[in-house]
């Protein structure tokens, strides 16, 4: 079964006709929705999951973290607008190759390639000067809370986004694959910053970047730099 390419092309044509004020409003609304969606997922799992906490207490929610999380939303909006600019000027092209097999392969490729890029980006963020300047704020959350995913320096947020845009410029992914990847990215990031293990313990043997895997990184900052998988940490000997 294939998706309706004509209908999809119609949606892309509609977006193509958006004015910049419309794009700014659309991007802001989408990112605010994703922000609230992430918080909702976190709170739902935290209230319904019966597993014990990984650490005794959640990191306290502060006004400073709240404001920084909102700044992250605005930075994500900016990245989206940069992506739109690149799309409108032909630097990024999205395909309508919509067979389910192609979509699965593209999503897997995005997950593995972004995991590799984020591993090196994350590792670089722990270099002493960069850590003190940018990444240290995130690691004040030794334990985590529902804002931890969004407590990032603006340069980190934009850096992560630019890596994604570089991949989209290098290969013409389908709009469905990109959308699925971005949804997985948000959900995975939210689950990774829970204070309860979400995945079964057996998942570790499948190289999955579980909640406990990332929680260990917050406890021991020289280990577990990966995001979706533990493949690169195992390969480069930073796995614990």
Image (tube, helix red, strand yellow):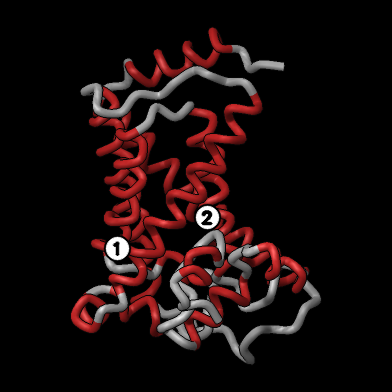
**Cα distance between the residues tagged 1 and 2:** 20 Å
> Furthest residue to the right?
50
> Which residue sits at x=73%, y=71%?
47
What residue does disc 2 label? 36
Whether residue 20 appears in this view of the structure is: yes
Q: Nearer the viewer, mark 1 or mark 2?
A: 1
Compared with residue 236, is residue 172 higher up or lower down, i.e. above or below? above
Which corner quadrant of the image does residue 66 belong to? bottom left
Judge by depth and name the residue closer to the eye, 206 or 136: 206
> Which residue sits at x=29%, y=26%?
87
- Quadrant position of the N terminus in the picture: top right
> Furthest residue to the bottom?
56
Which corner quadrant of the image does residue 137 belong to? bottom left
- Please count the marks in the image: 2
What residue does disc 1 label? 156
Judge by depth and name the residue closer to the eye, 173 or 85: 173
SS class, disc 1: helix
Residue 102 percent across, percent down from the top left: 58, 27
> Which residue sits at x=34%, y=55%?
160
Compared with residue 175, is residue 240 higher up or lower down, i.e. above or below? below
Judge by depth and name the residue closer to the eye, 40 or 10: 10
> Which residue sits at x=32%, y=41%?
165
SS class, disc 2: helix
Q: Earlier in the sequence, mark 1 or mark 2?
A: 2
Which corner quadrant of the image does residue 24 belong to? top left
Q: Which mark is residue 82?
A: none
Whether residue 21 appears in this view of the structure is: no
Circles 1, 2 touching at the beta carbon (< 8 Å): no
- Quadrant position of the C terminus in the picture: bottom right
Image-based side of 52 in relation to 183, left or right: right
């Amino acid at each position: 079964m294939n998706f309706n390419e004509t209908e999809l092309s119609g949606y892309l044509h509609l977006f193509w006709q958006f004015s910049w004020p419309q794009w700014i409003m659309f991007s802001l609304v989408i990112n605010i929705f994703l922000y609230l969606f992430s918080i909702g997922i976190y709170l739902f799992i935290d209230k319904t999951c019966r597993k014990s906490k990984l650490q005794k207490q959640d990191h306290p929610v502060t006004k400073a973290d709240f404001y920084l999380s909102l700044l992250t939303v605005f930075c994500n909006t900016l990245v989206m607008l940069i992506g739109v600019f690149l799309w409108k000027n032909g630097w990024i092209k999205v395909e309508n190759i919509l067979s389910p097999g192609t979509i699965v392969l593209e999503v897997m490729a995005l997950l593995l390639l972004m995991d590799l890029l984020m591993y090196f980006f994350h590792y670089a963020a722990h270099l002493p000067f960069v850590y003190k300047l940018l990444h240290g704020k995130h690691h004040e959350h030794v334990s985590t809370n529902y804002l931890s995913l969004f407590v990032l320096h603006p340069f980190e947020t934009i850096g992560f986004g630019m890596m994604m845009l570089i991949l989209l410029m290098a290969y013409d992914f389908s709009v469905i694959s990109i959308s699925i990847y971005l949804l997985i990215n948000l959900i995975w990031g939210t689950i990774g910053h829970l204070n309860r293990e979400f995945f079964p313990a057996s998942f570790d043997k499948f190289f999955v970047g579980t909640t406990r895997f990332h929680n260990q990184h917050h406890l021991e900052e020289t280990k577990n730099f990966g995001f979706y998988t533990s493949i690169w940490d195992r390969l480069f000997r930073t796995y614990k």
